[in-house]
């Protein structure tokens, strides 16, 4: 616990100073309340819809070499594949 106004480099920890005991206790209570409020109700993972996931799955299936390169950090040209994906969607929707 630091007085950032007077000790901006955080050299003097006030947590062990009796003068700040009451403030420290209040902060500890608030921290415990926050932790309790942030505890998940359950640990079942239910992901929401991920924007762009359909494109990624298409890209992985239709262009596996480029997908692998992308995973390795190579810039593969998003615009090129984005255009191809839009064309794929048009063809799929027209069927």
Image (cartoon, rainbow, N blue to C red):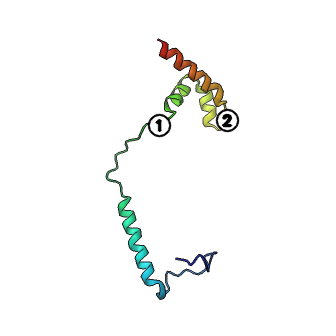
- In terms of sequence position, does the residue under pointer 2 or pointer 1 come before the other? 1
Look at the numbered disc 1 and give the secondary structure of its residue: loop
Q: Residue furthest left?
A: 41
**Rendered view: 47 above or below 84:** below
Q: Percent position (x, y) of residue 44? A: 34, 46
Q: Quadrant of residue 33?
A: bottom left
Left or right, 78 with reference to 17: right
Tell me what residue is drawn at x 47 percent, y 88 percent: 18
Tell me what residue is drawn at x 39 percent, y 63 percent: 35
Q: Percent position (x, y) of residue 87? A: 57, 18
Comparing 66 with 38, the one in front is 38
Left or right, 65 with reference to 31: right
Q: CA distance from mark 2 to mark 1?
A: 23 Å
Comparing 37 with 40, the one in front is 37
For label 2, count other residues whose C-alpha is less than 10 Å away and answer few (under 14), some (14-19) or many (20+).
few
Circle 2/circle 1 CB separation < 8 Å: no
- Mark 2 or mark 1: which is in front? 1
Tell me what residue is drawn at x 53 percent, y 17 percent: 90
Look at the numbered disc 2 and give the secondary structure of its residue: loop
Q: Which residue is mark 2?
A: 74
Comparing 43 with 79, the one in front is 79
For label 1, count other residues whose C-alpha is less than 10 Å away and answer few (under 14), some (14-19) or many (20+).
few
Q: Residue furthest bottom?
A: 18
**Rendered view: 35 above or below 11:** above
Q: Residue furthest top?
A: 95
Tell me what residue is drawn at x 63 percent, y 28 percent: 66
Q: Which residue is mark 1?
A: 50
């Amino acid at each position: 616990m630091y007085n950032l106004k007077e000790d901006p480099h955080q050299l003097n920890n006030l947590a062990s100073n009796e003068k700040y005991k009451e403030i420290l206790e209040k902060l500890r209570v608030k921290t415990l309340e926050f932790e309790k409020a942030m505890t998940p109700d359950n640990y079942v993972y239910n992901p929401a819809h991920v924007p762009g996931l359909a494109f990624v799955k298409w890209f992985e299936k239709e262009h596996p070499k480029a997908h692998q390169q992308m995973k390795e950090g190579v810039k593969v040209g998003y615009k090129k594949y984005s255009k191809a994906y839009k064309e794929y969607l048009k063809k799929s929707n027209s069927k």
